[in-house]
Structures are given as structure tokens and as C-alpha cells.
Image (spheres, grey):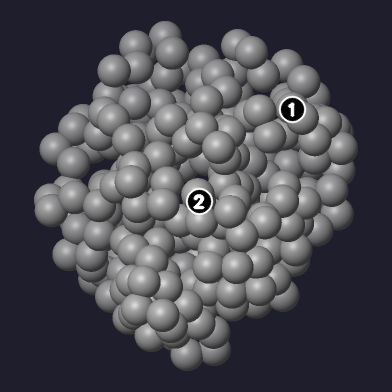
Amino acid sequence: MNTATTQGNSGLAIAAARAEGRAALVGYLPVGYPSVPGSLAALRALCGDGEGPGVDLVEIGLPYTDPMMDGPVIQRAGTRALERGVRTRDVFAAVEAVRAAGKPAVVMTYWNLVDRYGTDAFARDLAAAGGAGLITPDLVPDEAGDWLAAADAHGLDRVFLVAPSSSDARIVSTAAACRGWVYATAVMGVTGTRTSAPSAAPALVARLRTLAPDLLVGVGLGVSNGDQAAQIAGYADAVIVGSAFVKQLLAADDAGTPDDLTGLRAVVADLAAGVRR
């Protein structure tokens, strides 16, 4: 496998961190929460806001009515975003905001939203906004022909998921379909913060290193603090964090101060320090 063709735009951000002798920090937030303008401000804070290093790569979530793989924290934020009027097209403004902040952005979305928008049209508009690619948690490469073609046509990364239950054959085929990096879901079940780093993660990453040695690996699901990030940074190329960030937005919203990003910035700083230990 040719590393130059598999790193892609988002993979280059992860490779740049690796060249510094550390793992990259990938941060997730949903567009539209606590509002569309509020989510753009939160995404800028995720990028560092001029006050710190921030994340290396931003993962922008598209809220969905049936988020079967999301835990309660992300579900809550997504439901509120939908109630407050977020639309699929708002993700392109979010991508533009992240790019203006100097960081690359990928979109994480359930496939039905892309399918309804139109696969090629979504890829076209994502590329025009400066997006790097898509993470598609409920789309497997075997059923992704339209997306693979659209990604190639518009120069976008495609990031698929593998899990501890994935067979060696599935890992090989998934890795071959990825461009950018591969998303290793280190625990079985839905997303959400956990009190300790997933025990299955090192073994899954080791299998990926053997079966797809040229592909960068990001580990996600459950990371909540800098100590966990430092632990995962010891064996993965990227540490993916979502619920820990979203929790801070929910807390501010519940307190009646949805524009207060103090808590979010503190968690970003802790995790950014963690991957640099």
C-alpha cells in the first residue's frame, strides 16, 4: 500500500503530529449545538482560538434522528440541535469555520443524510467548503461504491471503522478502502466517556499494524482526559475525543450560559497536553 496515496488531507495532519514524535488529537463536536452560530464558536475554540494548540484535526458531526451508534451525551446534543433547526447544509459552514481557524476538518455522518442530499452533490459541496473527507460509521466498504467514486472525483478522504470484533479479512478490506486513516473503535457499544482507557485498544491497533502497516490509526470511543489520551498516544497515531467535549457544551447550556466555552477550552487544553507527554 502506498503511504502517499493513503494519507490524504486529514492523514497529513496526523502524520505531521507523528513527525513531532506524538499522536494527533482529533476532536468531535456536532454542528448546530447549542445553535448553529454557537457551534461555529465552539469549533473555533476546539481549534485553539489563538489561546493554545487545540486539536490537530476536527471531526464535525451531523445530528441525525436515529443515532444508533451515539451514546447519551452526543444523542442529547444532537436532539437539541435538530429541535433548534440545524440542517444538513449547515455542516459546510462549519467546515469553512474550521478551515478559517487553520485546521483540517472531516465530517462524521450517518450515511442516510448523505444519500438524501445526493452522494456526489455532498462530496462536491464538502470539497468546495474545504473539507478533507468523511467518516462513515454505518457504511461498510462493500456497500460504498457511490461514495468511493465521489471521493475519488472530488479528492476527499474516506475513513471507515474497524472494531475488536472485526476479522482479519474485514480489517484488510476496510484498510484498503480507506484514504487518510482508519478509525479503530476500541470498545464495543455506543460512544461515551469512560473512566479508563479501553483494554481492547492495544490489541486492535497491533492487528492493524500487522495487517495494514502503512495506514495511520486513530483510536476513539471513551477518551475523557489527558491521562487517557497520553496512554493511547503511546500506541496509536491519533486519539479521538468526542463526548468529553460535548459534555462541556451541555453543562453550559443546562446552566443557562450556552455561549460559555470556558469548560470546553479547559478540556481541550488538558487533552492537547496529554498527547504531548
Where does the image place residue 212, in percent across and percent down from the top left? 44, 26
Q: Confirm whether residue 30 shows in the render.
A: no
Quick one: 189 or 276, which is closer to the camera?
Answer: 189
Q: Which mark is residue 50?
A: none
Please state, as top left, top right, bottom left or bottom right, where the C terminus lies in the image: bottom left
**Image point 51% across, 32% down: which residue?**
66
Q: Secondary structure at mark 1?
A: helix
Mark pair 2, 1: CA separation: 19 Å
Judging by the rendered image, the residue that carries numbered circle 2 is 78
Relative height, residue 203 to residue 239 (above, below): above
Where does the image place residue 129, in percent across and percent down from the top left? 80, 58
**How many numbered marks does the figure carry?**
2
Judging by the rendered image, the residue that carries numbered circle 1 is 115
Query: Counting other residues with Cα less than 10 Å from the Cα at mark 1, is it few (<14), some (14-19), or many (20 or more)?
Result: some
For marks 2 and 1, give the one nearer the viewer.
2
Relative height, residue 106 to residue 102 (above, below): above
**Image point 34% across, 17% down: which residue?**
166
**Image point 73% across, 42% down: which residue?**
156
Where does the image place residue 178, in percent across and percent down from the top left? 58, 30
Query: Counting other residues with Cα less than 10 Å from the Cα at mark 2, is it few (<14), some (14-19), or many (20 or more)?
Result: many
Q: Is residue 22 left or right of residue 177?
A: left
Quick one: 198 or 114, which is closer to the camera?
Answer: 114
Q: Quadrant of residue 199?
A: top left
- N-terminal label among 2 and 1: 2
Amino acid tagged 2: Gly
Q: Is residue 183 left or right of residue 131?
A: left
Where does the image place residue 225, in percent across and percent down from the top left? 23, 65
Please state, as top left, top right, bottom left or bottom right, where the N terminus lies in the image: top right
Q: Secondary structure at mark 2?
A: helix
